[in-house]
Amino acid sequence: MVAPFVQLPWLPAAPADFASLCRRFGSGEGPAGAEAQRLSNFALDATQSGSLSRAIARRRKAKADFAPLSPFRLGLLSNATTDLIADCLPAAAARHGVLLDLVTTPFDQVMQQALDPSSETNNAGLDAVLVAVDHRWLQLDRSRLGGGDEQSAAALEQLRTVVTALRGNRAAPPILQTVPVPPSPLFGSYERRVRGTIRTMIEDVNRGILDLADETGCTVLDTAALAERIGTDLWFDAVQWGAYKLPFAAEAGPAHADMVGRLLGAIRGKARKCLVLDLDNTVWGGVIGDDGMEGIKIGQGSAVGEAFLAVQHAALDLRDRGIILAVSSKNDDEVARRPFREHPDMALKESHISVFQANWSDKASNLESIARSLNIGLDALVLLDDNPAERAQLRAALPMVAVPELPQDPSWYPGILFAAGYFEAVTFSAEDRIRVQSYASDAQRAEVFATSRDLGDYLGSLAMVMTATPFDVQGRQRITQLTNKTNQFNLTTRRYRESDIAAFDADPAVWTLQVRLQDRFGDLGMIALVICRTRRDGEETAWDIDTWLMSCRVLGRKVEEAMLAEVVAGARETGVARLRGTYIPTAKNGMVAEHYSRLGFSMVEEATDGTRYYELDVARYEAPDLPMTVRHGSVRTPESA
């Protein structure tokens, strides 16, 4: 039997000396990020979470380096006591790659904090505000038979007021949470059929929250789903509410914090991209090398076979939403591939696997090879492996790879994989759907490159077509995704929400460029973007390049040169005399430190923190020959002053 969800069963149990490990970490010296993340990757209870959160706070106060964790400043508005949330959240955020700075506010001051322009929430320089209100604050704690529709509308208007106020006071974008339904049915099974019951009102409000989020560019935390998963009888503790005004039972604190942490990680582009599958006793029952095709268990007709088939279906569902699938198995390559090619009950086929590693090398080496082949980081990988020894060895060798704990019964594998939330999403775009095929096409491109005489011959053979257009509504979701997920080829690593991107469209002093690329092997989708801001510099007009980012998958194709030619063309059309580029170093973007120099910019200043400032004279720029066709859409240029 697998442990209940509230105990985070996909994580290994914390060691017996965890408290002393936290004390040692909190008083330590040197880089702190990797150790904070390692300590967070256990199934921590509320007490252990608090110990780690306090240790992180001590190291932050000592100015420790927390790379590769991404800083995130979160405001918390609630009608309940938030001490429990505050204790658990920093530890859970570290688990998902985020260094959390949590700004709490006084008890039940939601509306006051939102409406007052001088409030801490509106002036704390936050990255997001979690509006953690429940059915009580929304006055949905009593049935309103005959008046439920009006009460639901009033509750939504109350939330809208908070969102509008935060937006109007230039606070950070809100995160709205759905509302759990308390287990107190007035009519029993007839509850959903009567307007004005607590359940029907809350369900109406939850649908309205999704619409409000879409309309205002808010992110949604599905707290209602979490409460259902844990069980509302456990979630709603009347004694703890009455005595301490806790928003939910203390036992649920770590699970709630983990859900918030994974959402913040997704906002920061930390969600995983690739599921790596072991084969024997993970994708099928038995050992293919010993049992042969006829001996492995998979398919309909037996509980074990159906359990492994469910694992394959889970992997295919993830692939359908853009998650890359890979294989890492200790096996002979030909033997490991046979079931994919010949077994009639296999749902997974060879064509579904982007990288297939079946050999006798150690798992760590194979996963490093997979990451290189896909041109993604090791922190983008999740390994599903039934063998506890392999899991422990991989965690020790590559702690940045996610490795869920698995019970003995494979029937639980899909549930554990999804419960862990490794692939949390805050957007879902058309590019996500084609990502997997795009990675498969990369392998074909690599084969062509291997037989090409030189780089020019290779690039010419790709028959590339680059489409350059300003930002538009259709691309807004993908643009937002790129600004939050791209870490390596990102000159300034500025993060923007969808509402921010929409604001750029309405700002006449902002010039934008989105770039798509396709070649004879397929469509790579949107792969790059630039955001420029107009600035008057004496008698001269300049553009500050606020953001320049690209997918690393198109490096070496002269896309950077083609993009600069587009930026210069837009600058000349608008009367801009000079481009100013900034490189802000991070733990991951060292590869673009010389980006502007390579493109012909002159460095004019380097700050003590490594930030570099560059300039390019628009009049003197000469566009190079490009190995691609460039197509254009309508271009909106900013005002020249």
Image (tube, grey):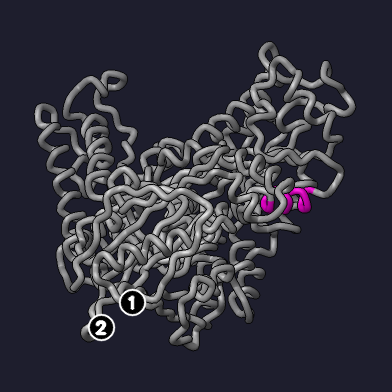
Counting from the top left corner in percent of width and height, residue 511 is at 28, 62
Label 1 near label 2: C-beta < 8 Å? yes
Residue 18 falls in which quadrant of the image?
bottom right
Numbered tag placed on residue 537 in the rendering: 2
- Depth check: give the residue in front, 57 or 294: 294
The residue drawn where x is 87% and y is 29% is 289
Callout 2: 10 Å neighbours few (<14), some, many (20+)?
A: few
Q: Is residue 298 magenta?
A: no
Residue extending furthest right? 290
Q: Give the range drawn in magenta.
A: 363-372
Q: What numbered label is drawn on residue 426?
A: none
Report the quarter where the N terminus lies: top right
C-alpha gap between disc 2 and disc 1: 10 Å
Quarter location, residue 81: bottom left
Q: Is the magenta stretch mostly helix, strand or loop?
A: helix
- Residue beneath the point at 52% across and 41% down: 435
Q: In this view, does 290 lie above or below 488?
A: above
Task: Choose the circle earlier in sequence order: 2 or 1.
Answer: 2
Disc 1 packing (10 Å; few <14; some 14–19; many ≥20): many
Amino acid at circle 2: Asp
Q: Which residue is drawn at 39% across and 76% down?
A: 620
Question: Is any atom of residue 514 visible in this view?
Answer: yes
In the image, what residue occupies the spot 71% across and 15% down?
344
Q: Is mark 2 on a helix, strand or loop?
A: strand
Q: Which mark identifies residue 578?
A: 1
Above or below residue 464? Residue 192 is above
Q: x and y percent of residue 209 in the render? A: 25, 42
- Of helix, strand and loop, which one carries label 1? strand
